[in-house]
Image: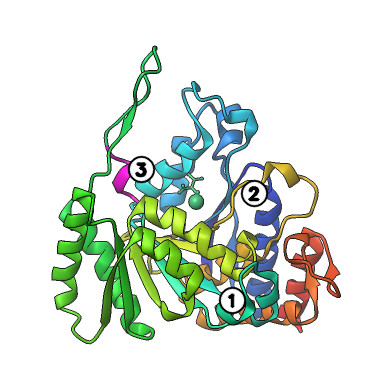
């Protein structure tokens, strides 16, 4: 198969983890007889510095033409001026919106070898295998907003959802739940927010068409608690943009580290293979404190490549091979510093990538 994977390395540890992702996809291409291209495009802080925009038009156009997009991470203290006209994070939001990626999948699977790496008790995290579907192109991230005025007296953001925006993401989550265990939890704050009351009504109506599913509506504050108390009871969780942002950082701690969690963002746009054009990225940020030190965990990026193979390229066997290679390397006791425990061997970003590559070739 020929495929073009647009790469947006971004800032901080973004380029380091992108390098390992490309390493792994190159081995996949070599072992399974595919031809993948990895053109790189500027985005984030580096794009503000070099091109003058966090998402240059040419980068967005190239992503639209690609079969899949891989992104490292964006942001850093250099671009943190609250009065700046553009910010690295705007680039991600513009990319999600520009590719109409309304559904963000964040699977949280606890690797058996890492149950003790979590700060939560092993018995609680052992059973975790859930997916959060976060709505990605609406809600408070995109509603009308007013920055603070000169007197710094007030500012606002608006959580705005239309019924079709809610409907399509709930449908997406329900279809996924059907292919898994059949359990779906829809998260909202319907006891307070009007947009959440609409969310609950629309979700209820959509889910009437999925009578086979075991559906629950859970308030977001309660979900924050349940995710720590008894995460094993959840399978698919669907929520709005902001709630998903917060709950997935929390859920990542079940898996031991933000450095372990991949993500995929999908919409209705198809690639040249007739499959969904997706954006794949680790859920972690640019980690400026460890950037350039070869200490970052590349596994979230590498596991995102497995999702990329499966969802945008239809390469199930290759996806499973990547996941198995990661399992094997972890089983050998190899760790990056974020997941290190006594008795494990701590390696660099590049060595972790090399070991996964070697496991793929074995
Ligand atoms: C994420 C990140 C982004 C978000 C930031 C970097 C804009 O936290 O992907 O979860 O809030 O969506
Ligand atoms: Mg986040």
Q: Dot 3 corresponds to which residue?
A: 141
Residue nearest the viewer, comparing 263 with 200: 200
Separation of residues labelled 3 and 1 (CA atoms) = 29 Å
Q: What residue is pinned by disc 1?
A: 110
| Magenta stretch encompasses residue 142 | yes
Q: Which mark is residue 14?
A: 2
Alpha carbon distance from label 3 to label 2: 23 Å
Mark 1 and mark 2: span between their CA atoms? 23 Å
Residue count near mark 1 (Cα–Cα under 10 Å), binned few <14, some 14–19, many ≥20: many
Q: Which residues are magenta?
A: 137-143
| CB contact under 8 Å: marks 1 and 2 | no
Residue 340: where, in percent of width, then height?
Answer: 78, 67
Q: Secondary structure at mark 2?
A: helix
Q: Taking 169 as reference, is 12 above or below it? A: above
Q: Residue at x 46, y 50 (%)?
A: 63
Instruction: Report whether the residue tagged 3 is closer than 8 Å to ligand 1.
Output: yes
Query: Which residue is at 52% across, 71% downward?
Result: 108
Percent across and percent down for residue 143 are 28, 39
> Which picture quadrant has residue 311?
bottom left
Q: Are marks 3 and 1 in contact (CB under 8 Å)?
A: no
Coordinates of residue 269 in the picture (x, y in percent): 33, 59
Q: Please identify, in this view, whether the residue under mark 1 or under mark 2 is nearer the observer.
A: 1
Q: Residues within 10 Å of mark 3 (few under 14, many from 20)?
A: some
Image quarter of residue 181: bottom left
Per the image, is 331 magenta?
Answer: no
> Could you tell whether 256 is left or right of 333 in the image?
left
- Asked where in the image residue 244 lies, by quadrant, the reply is bottom left
Q: Secondary structure at mark 3?
A: helix
């Amino acid at each position: 198969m020929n495929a073009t994977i647009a790469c947006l390395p971004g800032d901080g540890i973004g380029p380091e983890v992108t390098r390992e992702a490309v390493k792994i996809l190159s081995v996949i291409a070599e072992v399974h007889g595919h031809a993948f291209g990895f053109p790189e495009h500027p985005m984030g802080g580096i794009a503000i510095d070099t091109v003058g925009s966090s998402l240059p038009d040419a980068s967005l156009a190239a992503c639209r033409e690609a079969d899949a997009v891989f992104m490292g991470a964006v942001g850093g203290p250099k671009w943190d001026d609250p009065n700046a006209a553009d910010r690295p994070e705007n680039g991600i939001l513009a990319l999600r919106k520009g590719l109409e990626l309304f559904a963000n999948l964040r699977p949280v699977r606890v690797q058996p070898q890492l149950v003790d790496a979590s700060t939560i008790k092993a018995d609680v995290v052992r059973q975790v295998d859930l997916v959060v579907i976060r709505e990605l192109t609406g809600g408070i991230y995109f509603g009308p907003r007013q920055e603070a005025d000169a007197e710094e007296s007030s500012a606002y953001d608006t959580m705005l959802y239309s019924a079709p925006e809610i409907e399509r993401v709930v449908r997406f989550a329900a279809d996924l739940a059907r292919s898994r265990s059949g359990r779906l939890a829809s998260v909202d704050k319907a006891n307070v927010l009007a947009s959440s009351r609409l969310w609950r009504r629309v979700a209820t109506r959509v889910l009437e068409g999925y009578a086979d599913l075991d559906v629950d509506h859970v308030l977001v504050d309660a979900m924050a608690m349940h995710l720590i108390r008894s995460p094993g009871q959840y399978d698919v969780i669907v929520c709005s943009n902001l709630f998903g942002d917060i709950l997935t950082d929390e859920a990542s701690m079940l898996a031991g580290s933000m450095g372990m969690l991949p993500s995929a963002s999908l919409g209705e746009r198809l690639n040249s293979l007739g499959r969904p054009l997706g954006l794949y990225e680790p859920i972690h940020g640019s980690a400026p404190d460890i950037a350039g030190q070869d200490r970052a965990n590349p596994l979230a990026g590498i596991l995102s490549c497995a999702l990329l193979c499966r969802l945008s390229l239809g390469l199930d066997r290759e996806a499973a091979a990547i996941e198995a290679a990661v399992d094997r390397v972890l089983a050998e006791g190899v760790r990056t510093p974020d997941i290190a425990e006594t008795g494990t061997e701590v390696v660099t970003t590049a060595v972790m990538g090399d070991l996964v590559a070697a496991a793929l070739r074995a």
